[in-house]
Amino acid sequence: MRNLKADVLSKGEIGLIHEGSLEVLSEVGIKIAHAGARSIMERAGCTVDESNGVVRIPRDVINGALKSAPESWTFSSRDGKHDAKMVSDGSRTNFMNLGMGTKICHYVSENKFDTRDSTIPDIRNIAKVLDACENVDLVTQPVSALDLMDKRCVRTLHEAEAMITNTSKPFLLDPDPRYVDSYFDIMKACYSGDEEEALKKPFLMVGGCSSSPLQLDTPFCELAIKAGEYNMPFMSMTMAMAGTTSPVTLAGTMVIHNSEALAGITLAQLVKPGLPVIYGSCTTGFDFMTDTAPFGSPENALISSASSQMSQFYGVPCITSGAISDSKCPDFQSAQEATLNALLPALNGTSNVFGVGLIELGMTFSLEQAVMVNDMIPLIRHALEGFEVSSETLSIDAIKEVGIGGEFISRPETMAGMFGHTHPELFDRNMYEGWKNTGGKHTLELAHEKVQSILSEHVATPIEPGNLKEIQNIIREADKKVL
Amino acid sequence: MTQKDLNERAKKAVMAYDQKASAEVAKEAIAAKVDLVNLIQEGYTAGIQEVGDLYQAKKLFLPHIMSAANAMNAGVNLLTPELEKSGKSAGEGLGKFVICTIEGDIHSIGKDIVAIMLKVAGFNVVNMGRDIPVKDIVAAVKNEKPKAVGTSALMTSTMVNQKTFEELLKEEGVRDKVITNIGGAPCTQQWCDEIGADVYSENATDCVNKMVARVKM
C-alpha cells in the first residue's frame, strides 16, 4: 500500500519538458561518436550528419522506442532470492548504493576517520555489508579498485568478481565495453554453463553515461549495442550539472537530461526492441561557491524527483540519485542530506533511489553510512504508506468504551497493532537513563559495531565451487591477454 | 477442582489476558472454599510475574503487561471482599507503596503503568490517583504507613510540588519513615538530589528495579 505522493512537476510541466526535449533532439540533435550506432539511428529514420556525427532524432522514432521499452521487468539475482522489481508506475521504490567512488572512509574512533584510496578488499567488504543490509534491494559497483590500476589485469572483471562473490543481489556493473562478452560468460558460469538461463535471467546490468550537453560517446554506444546482443538490462544515465553542462535553471537542465536519457533509450531499443532499459539520472546542480556539483543538495532531490516523474510519464523504470551526501564522513550533514534526497524522490515514486553509503559528492564510500541509511529506509517506506482512515481505524467504539481519562494500552487492538509502528535498529529511542543503561552508545558507534559484526559473520549465498572456478578461469584468461 | 488446578488456571488466564476466565476461576475458588491467599500468590501473581519477566526480557510489551494486569484484577477483585470477610490478607509482599500524580497534575497513564509494574514486582500498591493535594499524600503516609511513596509530575509547573511534599513530610515529622520516589518526564536525578528525595526513576522498569533494590537493602 502506498498512499503518499508528492509531485514536483505538474502534468503541464511534464508536457513542456517532453516537448522541449523533442524539439532539442530533432533540431539540435545529439552527437553520437560511434559510427555503428549512428547507422542504427539512421536506418530508423534519424537524420545523420557524418561530418560531425550529429544525429537528429524525429519525434516518431522516440515514441516508437518508448513504446517498445518494457514498462516493468524483474532484475534477477544470481540466487533467485533477491530479484528486484523494476516498475514505472510509482508503486515500488527500491534502494541501492551508488558508484563509482575511488575512496573509502574508514571509521577509526568517534569523530576520527581515515579516508584512503579504495581497493579490492574494500570492494569485498562493501559488497558483504550491502548484502547484509536487508533494505538494500540491488547493488552497483561502489568504488573502483585503485590497487589494480597499474596491474596487468582486467580491473573491471576483478571488481565484478569481488562484488558477486560477496553479494547475490542484482548488480549494476561499472562496465568496460571491451568485456561485455566476459560479463555474459560470468553469468553463464554462475548458471552452471546454461546460456539460456543467462539470457533469460541476467543478474548483471550495464549502463552508460551521456556526456552533457548532448553527446553519446563510443563506450556508451558499444555498451548499448552489446547489451542488446546479450539481453542484458541497459541503463541510460545522465550527469549534467546545472549551470555548467546544462542551463542554470533546473527546468532547462531537465530538458538536457531528458533529451540525453531519451536518446540513449532510443538507441538501446533500436538495437533490441523490448530490451529492459533504465531511465537514469545523476544530474544535479552546481555550487559556484565551491565549484563542485553537490549530490546532497535539494537541487539534486528536485531533479531526481522530476526525472522520476518523466520516467513514469514514459513508462520506463528509472534509477535516480538519492540517499547520498557531500559530507566527508558520516555525520549530521550526511544524515540530513541523505534523508532529504531519499525522501523526496521516494515520495515521487522513483523506481530506484541510487546512493546508499556514498558521501563526498559521490567519491567516497562509508560502510557506517550505508548501515545507517539501511536503518532509515524502512522509516521512509513507512512514511510513504501514510495511514488508513476507515470506520474501523477511526476506533470510535474503542474511544467510547475507554472514555475520558482511561487508557488504550490494554486494548486488544493495541496488542495486535503495536508492531505496525516503526522501530529502527540503530537509531535509539530510549530516554537518557535507558540509553545510558543499554550501553550509552551513539548511532555512529552502533553503526560501526554493526559493520564489524557483518564483516565477521555475514556470508552471502555462495557461488557453486565449480562455477566459481569457471569464473576465475574466465578472468585469468582475460588477464593473460592484457599486455 | 483442587487448589493446584485452580492456581494453574488462574495463572493461565492471566497469561492469556483473559478477564472472563480469570473471574470464573475466582468464583469457582470461592465456591470450592480453597485457600484464596494461596490462589492469589501461586496463581494470579505467578502468572503476572511470568508476563513481567517476559516484559523485562523484551519478549512482551506494555500492552501485554497491562492486559495481564486487567485479567488479574478481574479475579482478585472478586477475592478481596471474601478475604476481608475472613480477616485475611493477600500479604504485604515487598511492602506497601503509595503512589499518585502530584497536586495540580492530571497526567496519570505513566503513573498507572508504574503502579501495575510495582504490583507485578510484589509491592502492595495503593494508587491514590491524580492531582492529589500534597497534604493528602502526607496524610496517606501517616495513615497507611507505607514503605515507599512515589509522586509523579509531568510538568515543570507541578514538579515544584514534589519539593513542597518533601518539606511537608519533614514538618510533619514523617520524612524518615518513608522512602520517597519521584518520576515523570521533566524530573531528573539532579532534581531528585536537589529536593532531597530518595530515589529518582526515569521509567517504570527503572522504578521497579531501583525500588525493589532499595526496600531489600
Image (cartoon, rainbow, N blue to C red):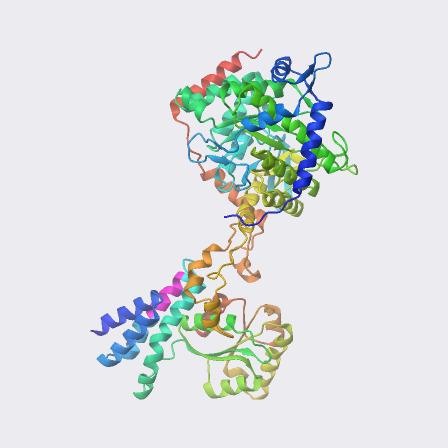
Q: Tell me residue A370's x, y (percent).
A: 56, 40
The answer to whether residue A249 is left or right of residue B75 is right
Give the answer, above or below, for where B55 lies relative to A443.
below
Residue A105 seen from this side: no
In the image, the segment drawn in magenta is B46-54
What is the x, y in percent for residue B155? 62, 72
Residue drawn at x 48%, y 20% is: A184
Report if residue B81 lies within the magenta region: no
Q: Where is residue A425 in the image (x, y as percent from the top left)?
A: 51, 50
Q: Is residue B48 magenta?
A: yes
**Labels in figure, total:** 0
Q: Is residue A437 above or below residue B3?
A: above
Q: Answer whether residue A186 is visible to the viewer in this image.
A: yes
Pinpoint residue B74: horizontal percent, then vertical percent.
36, 75
From the viewer's side, name the closer residue of B59 and A285.
A285
The structure residue drawn at horizontal position 59% and vertical position 87%, both measured from the top left corner, is B171
Indicate the quadrant where residue A36 lies: top right
Q: In which quarter of the image is the C terminus of chain A?
A: top right
Outermost right residue: A289
- The structure residue drawn at horizontal position 56% and vertical position 23%, both measured from the top left corner, is A269
- Viewer-proximal residue, A321 or B51? A321
Closer to us: A60 or A130 = A60
Vertical arrangement, residue A321 with respect to residue B63, above or below: above
In the rendered structure, the answer to whether residue A290 lies left or right of residue A464 reads right
